[in-house]
Image: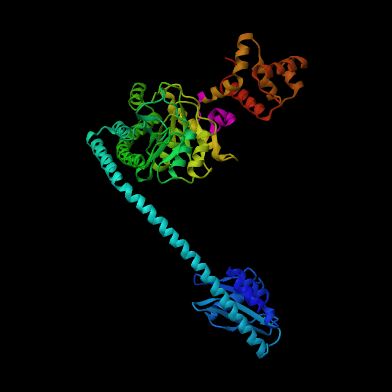
């Protein structure tokens, strides 16, 4: 009786089931093996259920499908799954076992306790439902209040929408582009309005307060801003601007923004901003189509540059597409093995190059993309940006030596391919390799000409050659004999007919003049190869 009163006084269904399982022994020699609550058409196990037989017991209870029935538990001679039923149906199950078969009186007492448990659960369920219904009623009242408030604003909103639509029609009829759109929005909202391209460069500004000069965009911050706004369905406030992306078909073409320093923009202003973004999407789509034509012109120009073309024609064509070929350029080859070098990947490379501030012309080949950039690329910026864009770091980039004139571009293209190939064949297969940093690898393999050998020798022996010419000395010859004698001081001194101390002095001067350390394995190897090329291939002094 005490247990029954406690069960009815408990408001939580899980707590009722726990109390019943803890005190089932009040009805006889019983033990509660498991308990279940009926929730949303399923039986939810109680946290007090043991783990040893939980799976088998749970499966058996579900097989009973709402009926009472026997349950087998190892070590217990008697077991039953007892349905906890109320007026509205099954409320749960209680699985009870005993070491001995219960007497008739014990069974009767257990049945009475099960009825009390079921009644307590029904009472708790009823209280919970009553609470939910009260919440629903309050929610309906709140919604009715909101609807009344909305009805009050309908007339004003309809009038504002007509004004917006009138301006939209005027913009469409004027064909004035993004400037007409910003002017119309400024007249409607009273706020400064601006349009930027996706890289953060100003395209149009209407209203007061336009910065002069307009700030140069930061590619990293611009991308972060685009990602932040893209995650939201509508406009996003960033500092004093309300920003909405212009992205027809999912591709970001630009940014439309209102400068709202005082936070005055309301629903009507946001509505006007949405209409303006829709108009701007149409305008920028048209501009993108024109850009596609320009992109094809760029690629035709790069293809001709890589194959070799006349300077006058190249300079004229590059000026026509807005690129200055008179500056020093680098050829950059990009390859991502898990991405085909198709149009989509070429656009990815172009976006990444723009994001890291590379001004370049672009084309693609069967398995790689080629950039002709007007400045030396950063050692890792393009690779990191492409890794982020593609979602994988398994890519390689080769960069040529600087190109000072158009005629050198085909040769620099070969250098960039050589740098890429060396990177692909090295232990660190992924990353950026500069041709100027290849050292000995620059003169290995097929396709190298006499000029490359001269460049390699000049890089490693140029200071010594100039010193010998100026002072009528024999530093390069001394270094050559030193390597020919396997680094043996006595043999080298004898072959040069000088004293050992004189040889030691010359080798120290060689270190001072060239800046190379003969004790460094890589420097020593490159110097030895350079002296051999100088002596045998290039003919030594003169």
Which residue lies at the image location 38% right of the left edge and 34% below the top edge?
258
The colour mode here is: rainbow
Location of residue 111 with respect to 222 vertically, above or below: below
Location of residue 471 with respect to 29 vertically, above or below: above
Residue 327 in view of the camera? yes
Location of residue 390 with respect to 132 vertically, above or below: above
Q: How many marks?
A: 0
Residues 121 and 309: in front is: 121
Q: Could you tell me residue 315's position as x and y percent? A: 36, 23
Which residue lies at the image location 51% right of the left edge and 41% below the top edge?
387
Which residue lies at the image location 34% right of the left edge and 40% below the top edge?
277
Q: Which residues are magenta?
A: 433-451
Q: Which quadrant: the C terminus? A: top right
Q: Quadrant of residue 3?
A: bottom right
Q: Which quadrant: the N terminus? A: bottom right
Answer left or right for 386 relative to 104.
Answer: left
Residues 272 and 491: in front is: 272
Answer left or right for 369 relative to 248.
Answer: right
Q: Could you tell me residue 233's position as x and y percent? A: 41, 46
Which residue lies at the image location 47% right of the left edge and 63% below the top edge?
134
Q: Could you tell me residue 541's position as x and y percent? A: 59, 15
Location of residue 372 with respect to 66 vertically, above or below: above
């Amino acid at each position: 009786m005490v247990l029954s009163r406690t069960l009815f006084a408990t408001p939580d269904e899980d707590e009722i089931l726990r109390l019943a399982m803890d005190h089932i022994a009040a009805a006889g020699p019983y033990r509660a093996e498991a308990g279940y609550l009926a929730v949303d058409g399923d039986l939810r196990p109680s946290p007090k259920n043991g783990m040893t037989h939980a799976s088998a017991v749970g499966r058996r209870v579900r097989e009973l499908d709402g009926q009472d029935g026997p349950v087998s538990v190892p070590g217990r001679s008697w077991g039953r799954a007892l349905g906890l039923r109320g007026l509205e149906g099954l409320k749960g199950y209680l699985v009870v076992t005993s070491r001995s078969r219960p007497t008739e009186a014990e069974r009767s007492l257990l049945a009475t306790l099960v009825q009390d448990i079921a009644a307590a659960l029904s009472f708790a369920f009823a209280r919970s439902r009553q609470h939910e219904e009260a919440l629903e009623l309050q929610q309906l009242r709140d919604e009715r209040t909101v609807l009344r408030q909305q009805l009050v604003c309908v007339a004003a909103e309809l009038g504002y929408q007509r004004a917006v639509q009138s301006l939209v029609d005027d913009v469409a009829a004027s064909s004035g582009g993004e400037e007409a759109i910003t002017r119309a929005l400024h007249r409607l909202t009273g706020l400064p309005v601006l349009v930027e391209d996706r890289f953060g460069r100003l395209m149009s500004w209407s209203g007061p307060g336009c910065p002069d000069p307009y700030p140069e965009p930061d590619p990293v911050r611009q991308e972060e801003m685009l990602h932040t706004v893209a995650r939201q369905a509508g406009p996003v406030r960033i500092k004093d601007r309300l920003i909405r992306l212009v992205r027809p078909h999912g591709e970001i073409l630009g940014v439309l923004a209102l400068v709202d320093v005082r936070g005055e923009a309301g629903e009507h202003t946001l509505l006007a901003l949405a209409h303006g973004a829709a108009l701007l999407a149409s305008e920028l789509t048209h501009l993108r189509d024109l850009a596609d034509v320009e992109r094809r012109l760029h690629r035709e120009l790069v293809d001709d540059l890589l194959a070799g073309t006349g300077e006058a024609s190249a300079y004229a064509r590059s000026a026509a597409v807005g690129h200055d070929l008179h500056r020093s350029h680098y050829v950059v080859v990009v390859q991502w093995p898990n991405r085909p070098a198709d149009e989509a990947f070429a656009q990815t490379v172009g976006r990444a190059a723009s994001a890291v501030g590379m001004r370049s012309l672009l084309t693609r080949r069967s398995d790689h993309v080629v950039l002709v950039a007007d400045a030396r690329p950063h050692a890792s910026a393009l690779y990191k940006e492409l890794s982020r864009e593609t979602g994988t770091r398994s890519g390689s980039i080769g960069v040529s030596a600087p190109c000072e004139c158009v005629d050198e571009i085909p040769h620099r293209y070969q250098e960039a391919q050589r740098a890429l190939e060396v990177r692909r064949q090295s232990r660190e297969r992924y990353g950026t390799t500069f041709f100027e940093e290849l050292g000995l690898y620059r003169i290995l393999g097929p396709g190298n000409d006499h000029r490359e050998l001269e460049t390699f020798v000049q890089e490693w022996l140029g200071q010594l050659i100039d010193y010998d010419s100026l002072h009528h000395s024999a530093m390069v010859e001394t270094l050559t004999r030193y390597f020919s004698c396997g680094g043996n001081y006595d043999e080298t001194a004898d072959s040069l007919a000088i004293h050992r101390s004189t040889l030691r002095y010359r080798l120290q001067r060689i270190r001072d003049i060239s800046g190379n350390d003969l004790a460094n394995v890589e420097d020593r190897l490159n110097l030895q190869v350079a002296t051999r090329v100088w002596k045998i291939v290039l003919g030594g002094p003169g």
